[in-house]
Image (spheres, rainbow, N blue to C red):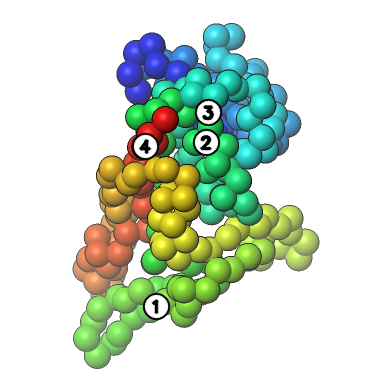
Amino acid sequence: PKKGETILDLACGQGFFARAFANSGAKVVGVDISPSLIAFAKEHSLKELTFHVSPAHKLNFLNDSSVDAIALVMAIQNIENPNEVLKECTRVLAPGGRMVIVMSHPAFRIPQSSDWGFDEAKSIQYRRIDSYMSDAKIKIDMHPGKKESEQTITFHRPLQVYFKLFHKHNFLVSRLEEWISHKTSATGPRKGAEDTARKEFPMFLCLEVIKHGA
């Protein structure tokens, strides 16, 4: 973050990144649909930070072209209407402003349709993908293994869906990074294969897009 710029932390949760952005000298506005998370964010943040309870596609408290940058961290895959959200982001973002999106990698981390496997003959760990091109709305147990578990909803979309939406809403992709895990396995017969696989299959994707035009 650049000192003095206005950053929108969209789907900010409990305000972790909003506080980090503010510590870098930015003016930060945090938004989340959850009243309880926004209450936590307000309680644990400096008074200078501004927080709002709102869905990501209704930012009526922000003027047109009023923010310099938007952060959307590990949230877009949990948003049902990315078209409306990106349309609103275009409205509030200044021309030439940037949006940074971090998500689960759509090509390698598909809930209930991807998993690790091990080839005994070749002694390699591989990533199995059961489906990719089909959009999916997936229920996830928040407490796996419990008899009664709250559920959340996540959405899988292939990469082309996001890139078409960027084009539709005048965003140009300026940067793409694929993030691997730096964890290491405990000593065992599969340690080498598991550590190698983590470096070959990125579980997270980071995109920077720039608002093009007026």
Instruction: Select label 1 or label 4 by which is in front.
Output: 4
How far apart, in angstroms, are the residues tagged by discs 2 and 1?
35 Å
Would you name the residue on which mark 2 appears?
Answer: 89
How far apart, in angstroms, are the residues tagged by discs 3 and 1?
40 Å
How far apart, in angstroms, are the residues tagged by discs 1 and 4?
37 Å
Quadrant of the frame with the C terminus = top left
Count of numbered badges drawn on the protein: 4
- Contact (CB < 8 A) between labels 3 and 1? no
Would you name the residue on which mark 4 appears?
Answer: 212
**Which is more N-terminal, label 1 or label 3?**
3
Residue type (three-letter) at the residue carrying disc 1: Arg
Residue type (three-letter) at the residue carrying disc 2: Cys
- 70 vs 56, left or right, is left
| Pointer 1 local density, CA inside 10 Å: few below 14, some 14–19, many at least 20 | some
| Residue 85 appears in the figure | yes
Residue visible at 73% across and 55% down in the picture: 150
| Pointer 4 local density, CA inside 10 Å: few below 14, some 14–19, many at least 20 | some
Which of the two residues, 126 or 11, is positioned nearer the viewer here? Answer: 11
Residue 197 locus on image (x, y percent): 27, 67
Badge 3 element: helix
Would you name the residue on which mark 1 appears?
Answer: 128
Would you name the residue on which mark 3 appears?
Answer: 92
Residue 51 locus on image (x, y percent): 62, 21
